[in-house]
């Protein structure tokens, strides 16, 4: 009988969690349709919905890919990200080959720099947690590191998935 009660409580928690994690599609264009979102009692601004929650509060100016910065990003990626991410397949986290087409540069950097708050408060962060079941961990990176990672993701995103 105790097992039945325990299972019932777990199902109720899972149902509540699943309901709270549902959101709209993750592409850039659909997220701009919302002007603001009420998530766990906090009002998210249009900027935060489009670009994530974190220290990046203005547009990142993208120029042609800086190969030197991308090489720095590759080293950081290999040291800190490969335990959970691959480019062309689901692993612990989502595949990253096309992440720069799915998310804004600011969203990518805010996710890298502030994954905990994005998982807790952002509809897309909650959706990713529901799908991948493991929250992204803050890997002790700086804004400069996150910018280098972004540049590496841009470079890798240009490669075909053949």
Image (spheres, helix red, strand yellow):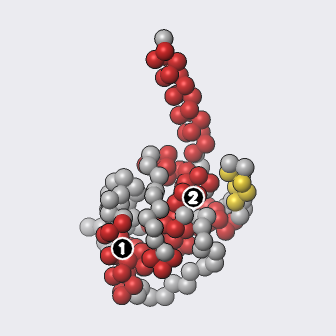
| Residue 137 circle label | none
Front of the two marks 2 and 1: 1
Q: At 46% from the left edge and 17% from the top edge, which residue is drawn?
A: 3
Along the line of sight, the residue nearer the viewer: 83 or 150: 83
Q: Position of residue 73 (x, y in %)?
A: 38, 77
Q: Is residue 106 above or below residue 85?
A: below
Q: Secondary structure at mark 2?
A: helix
How many numbered badges does the structure rendering display? 2
The reply to whether callout 2 and callout 1 are in contact (CB within 8 Å) is no
The answer to whether residue 2 is visible is: yes
Residue 67 at what x, y percent from top left? 36, 86
Neighbours of disc 1 within 10 Å: few (<14), some (14-19), many (20+):
some
Q: Is residue 103 left or right of residue 89?
A: right
Residue 41 versus residue 141 in the image, above or below: above
Residue located beneath label 2 in the image: 118
**Residue bearing the label numbered 1:** 76
User: Residue at point 72% right, 54% down?
Assistant: 42
Query: From this viewpoint, is residue 147 visible?
Result: no
Per the model, the C-alpha gap separating discs 2 and 1 is: 21 Å
Mark 2 packing: few (<14 Cα in 10 Å), some, or many (20+)? many
Image quarter of the C terminus:
bottom left
Earlier sequence position, callout 2 versus callout 1: 1
């Amino acid at each position: 009988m105790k097992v039945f009660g325990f299972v019932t409580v777990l199902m109720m928690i899972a149902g509540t969690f699943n309901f709270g994690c549902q959101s709209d599609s993750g592409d850039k264009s659909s997220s701009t349709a919302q002007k603001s979102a009420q998530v766990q009692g906090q009002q998210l601004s249009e900027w935060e919905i489009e670009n994530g929650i974190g220290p990046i509060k203005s547009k990142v100016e993208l120029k042609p890919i800086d190969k030197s910065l991308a090489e720095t990003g590759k080293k950081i990626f290999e040291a800190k990200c490969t335990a959970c991410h691959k480019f062309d397949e689901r692993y612990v986290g989502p595949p990253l080959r096309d992440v720069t087409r799915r998310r804004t540069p600011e969203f990518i950097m805010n996710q890298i720099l502030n994954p905990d708050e994005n998982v807790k408060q952002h509809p897309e962060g909650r959706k990713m947690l529901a799908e991948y079941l493991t929250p992204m961990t803050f890997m002790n990176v700086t804004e400069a590191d996150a910018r280098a990672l972004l540049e590496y993701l841009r470079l890798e995103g240009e490669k075909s998935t053949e």
